[in-house]
Amino acid sequence: MTEKNRPLMIVEDDLALQKQIKWSLDRFDSVTAHDRASALLQLRQHLPAVVTMDLGLPPDADAVSEGFRLLEQIVAFDADIKVIVLTGQNDQSNALRAVAMGAYDFLAKPFEPELLNLTVERAFRMFVLQVENKRLRSLYQPDALSGLTTRDPEMMRICRTIEKVASSKATVMLLGESGTGKEVLARGLHQASPRREEKFVAINCAAIPENLIESELFGYEKGAFTGASKTTLGMIETANGGTLMLDEIGDLPFHLQAKLLRFLQERTIERVGGRQEINVDVRVVCATHQNLKALISEKQFREDLYYRLAEIVVNIPPLRARIGDPALLAHAFVRRFVQEQNRSSLTLSQEAIRAIELHPWPGNIRELENSIKRATIMADGPQITSEDIGLKSDTSNDTNASFDLRVIRDNAEKTAIITALGRVNGNVLKAAELLGVSRPTLYDLMYRLGLK
């Protein structure tokens, strides 16, 4: 990136001083603003890497409140932007406060043009280094959530949450409909944690008969019951040092909930038929599609156990609520099943993609996966049709409750871009053609809308 590739923004209400600063920084491609509103507009339109700004802005140029509000909004928009605050000689306290809020540096007025140029150049270099560092880290750092395919903003936020809590010991509860990818997220949590080299053990509380689940969870001693010919470790003990996933925790029998609660509190277990307490160090992740609070009110689930399990709660949206994901996942499943079944090249027709986008998918990702698998087997030609998937073409309307034109435009652009990227399987060039814009324009829009 050169100085002309990404503009510098100058925020100054004194037009004479504004011209002087722009003249001093003439080798940079500068845009100017005189107040907070115009600065935010220029920020969104030009995405400057560096901003120089005065804290005293209209409507009260003698105070600093408007300047600090603008600084806060710039940092919230993009923390990588380097903000250089220009202050009066006797305004050091405000300058230090600005740095504490996220400003890169400050200079006192009247400034030396050479010093201003040097500071801006250093800020540009720091910006470039940080962007390059993030790019390299994304290339070489293994992705713990590589099993998850999504472009939906809410799912991306959930991924960031999983990455944040992975290093802690907090118990995580994953809530969502069946087939939304709860186990994929649980495995991603394990892979991103310091326990990644240890075992990940998953047990489905709804799939094991009630008379067996206690011994499956806690293990049993030799002779504890008929057929117990040897001491056997339970799932909790097997996961020692690693991660234990309790899937469908809402189906855990009520009489076992107290024993699980004691384990979570004491981190010790007793095998069935045993009297010895065994220390176990395990990270617990639980998941369910049920409404646990409703089960609590019906006296089917212990309230104290719920709050012990719900240290971190992650609500996973259904597939129908994920913008662009149905088509994106469909492309990924087609590639996988074509390879597994040794079929020749097979693609989704545009009519099939449209049908996939409109279908509500009550069975979520699992239903979509099974539908695509069946379609890759049944398709006769080189393209999968909506009939192959078992869907009908339809039309639907979308409404937007917001009357803020800027919000409506941004939401519409974001939805269109995510949908287009999903439809063309993430190919930016094809998405740009579909949207009727150039590839650089699409990259700029993606950056501005936070779709990096």
Image: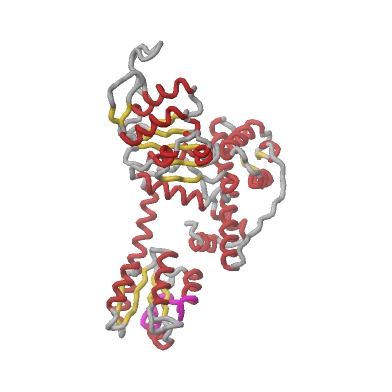
- Between 416 and 409, the one nearer to me in the picture: 409
Q: Position of residue 373 (x, y in %)?
A: 60, 33
Left or right: 106 in relation to 56: left
Q: What is the basis of the colouring in this image?
A: secondary structure
Residue 337 drawn above or below residue 114: above
Q: Quadrant of residue 376?
A: top right
Left or right: 375 in relation to 288: right
Q: Position of residue 294 (x, y in %)?
A: 53, 40
- Between 208 and 71, the one nearer to me in the picture: 208
What residue appears at the point 58 percent right and 41 percent down from the top-left corner?
330
Count of picture labels: 0
Is residue 186 something that shows in the picture? no
What residue appears at the point 58 percent right and 48 percent down from the top-left corner?
321
Left or right: 323 in relation to 36: right
What residue appears at the point 43 percent right and 43 percent down from the top-left corner?
145
- Between 150 and 245, the one nearer to me in the picture: 245
The reply to whether the magenta stretch includes residue 29 is yes
Residue 435 drawn above or below residue 103: above
What residue appears at the point 40 percent right and 26 percent down from the top-left corner?
217
Residue that lies at the very extreme toward the bottom in this rendered image: 16
The reply to whether the magenta stretch includes residue 61 is no
Q: Quadrant of the N terminus?
A: bottom left
Is residue 321 something that shows in the picture? yes
Residue 256 drawn above or below residue 77: above
Q: Position of residue 49 (x, y in %)?
A: 40, 68
Q: Position of residue 65 (x, y in %)?
A: 40, 76
- Between 441 and 51, the one nearer to me in the picture: 51
Query: Which residue range is magenta in the image?
Result: 22-37
